[in-house]
Image (spheres, rainbow, N blue to C red):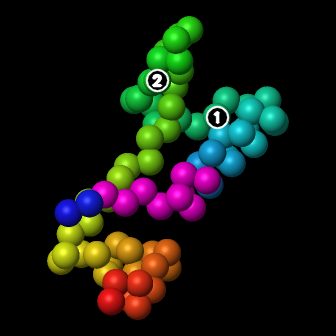
Amino acid sequence: MTVFKDARALADRTFRMVDGLLLNKTPETDGITTYNNGVKNMPTYICKPLTVTAENYAEILINSGRYEASDFN
């Protein structure tokens, strides 16, 4: 068992948040999570990790297009 956070999803979320800030909009957050940066609690958006097992690795990793089946041989 391991966990998977698709870097493409993380990059997309980061881009959308920064783009919102550059357009003087409030970036979308998950409305639940905050992160204390040492100055204050900052709203955040957590991309949930997926649990990967021997039973579901193909569905999660290969079907995502991130990996090829040959990567696991």
Give the magenta part as a residue range. Answer: 3-11
Query: Above or below — where is 11 with respect to 31?
Result: below
Is residue 65 on the magenta stretch? Answer: no
The three-letter code of the residue at mark 1 reads Pro
Towards the viewer: 41 or 54: 54
**Around disc 2, counting alpha carbons within 10 Å, would you say few (fewer than 14), some (14 to 19), or many (20 or more)?**
few
The three-letter code of the residue at mark 2 reads Tyr
Q: CA distance from mark 1 to mark 2?
A: 15 Å
For residue 19, what is the image quadrant? top right
Q: Is residue 42 visible?
A: yes
The secondary structure type at the circle numbered 2 is strand
Q: Which residue is mark 1?
A: 27
The secondary structure type at the circle numbered 1 is loop
What residue is rendered at 39% in x and 89% in y? 69
Q: Is residue 63 visible?
A: no
Give how far across and how far down residue 33 sits, in percent.
41, 29
Give how far across and how far down residue 62 sits, in percent.
40, 81
> From the image, which quarter does the C terminus lie in?
bottom left
What residue is rendered at 64% in x and 34% in y? 27
